[in-house]
Image: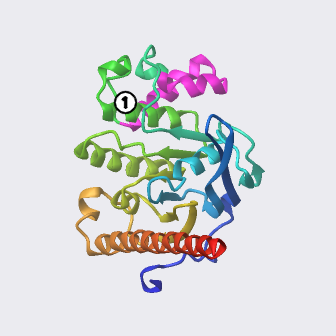
Amino acid sequence: MSNIVQKFETVSKDTGKIEIKGISRVFNIRRNNNREKNEFTALKDINLTIYKGEFISIVGPSGCGKSTLLDIIAGLAKPSEGEIYIDNKLITGPDLDRGIVLQGYALFPWRTVRHNVEFGLEIKGVPKSQRKDISQKFIELVGLKGFEDRYPYELSGGMKQRVAIARALAYDPEVLLMDEPFAAVDAQTRETLQDELLRIWEETHKTIIFVTHSIEEAVLLSDRVAVMSANPGSVREVIDINLPRPRRAGDVRTSADFAWTTHKVWELLHYGEIEERKVATSNVNLAEEISTSAAL
């Protein structure tokens, strides 16, 4: 197992932009008409440093807490334990230093493309005289010039996601949080959006935290990939992606290095899940033995 993992060395990196320190999240689950309360640990002792201008992806099995972790970074949820800092400032709630792009677009149907993109600028208090120029810049950045006056119902899924990205970038957040943003589109559109996101990152060098179930997508886009385990969710390993930039999906996917790196992440997830099942089975067997011994 140790042969397939390259651990990340911090000696050559700058000070972390985001410091995730000992994050755990426990949910209280009530059953039997709320008479019985059980605890479910979604995240346990997450520690991770994310660097300025870095593109890092988070992958892991379903239910491992990827989206929960992103919600905590966004300030939309609070951890049960631990703290997260951006530039040494404790995160206590949502703020304009973080932009969020979700799978479901979350556009306002009564607003045009331009007015959707300008929403964050309005919240930030940018004068109306400046908002049009700023929104136009980002509308063109995501390739939607000519669609400024269209409404969401007039756009394809891929175009809606471009609007969501432009809106998140327009008010100039320091960090962009993306939760499965391309999961709802077809494969061809997804590859196009991946190329667009790579191009946008090369132009803006925003710090991006990207949650995905796709190993290939994570390897294609990222500088590093954090691989999570499940039950409870924790960071198993963080892997360097040593593929040259700039990258484009069609070129990178055919390279031997891409295939090798993708397989490495897959092995880490696959063997990790096998080990977790072994531990779970062992715990069940042990509990049965204890129960039998007690009965005797």
Q: Is residue 186 visible?
A: yes
Q: Quadrant of residue 8?
A: bottom right
Q: Nearer the viewer, residue 201 or 59?
A: 59
Q: Is residue 139 above or below residue 247?
A: above
Q: Amino acid at mark 1?
A: Lys
Q: Is residue 150 above or below residue 245?
A: above
Residue drawn where x is 51% and y is 69% of the image? 280
Span highlighted in magenta in the image: 116-142
Along the horizontal axis of the image, is 103 left or right of 82? left
Colour scheme of this structure image? rainbow
Q: Secondary structure at mark 1?
A: helix
Where residue 275 appears, as percent x and y from the top left, is 47, 75
Where residue 36 appears, as percent x and y from the top left, is 67, 43
Q: How many other residues sit within 10 Å of disc 1, few (<14), some (14-19) or many (≥20)?
A: many
- In the rendered image, the quadrant that contains the C terminus is bottom right
Where residue 191 appears, as percent x and y from the top left, is 28, 49
Disc 1 marks which residue?
160
Q: Is residue 17 above or below residue 261?
A: above
Q: Nearer the viewer, residue 134 or 120?
A: 120
Residue drawn where x is 51% and y is 65% of the image? 229
Residue drawn where x is 29% and y is 29% of the image? 156
Q: What is the number of callouts on the image?
A: 1
Q: Is residue 34 above or below residue 264?
A: above
Along the horizontal axis of the image, is 238 left or right of 290? left
Residue drawn where x is 54% and y is 45% of the image? 176
Q: Main secondary structure of the magenta part?
A: helix
Where residue 142 appears, as percent x and y from the top left, is 38, 37
On whether residue 218 falls in the magenta region, the answer is no
On whether residue 125 falls in the magenta region, the answer is yes
Please, which residue is most extreme toward the front here? 296
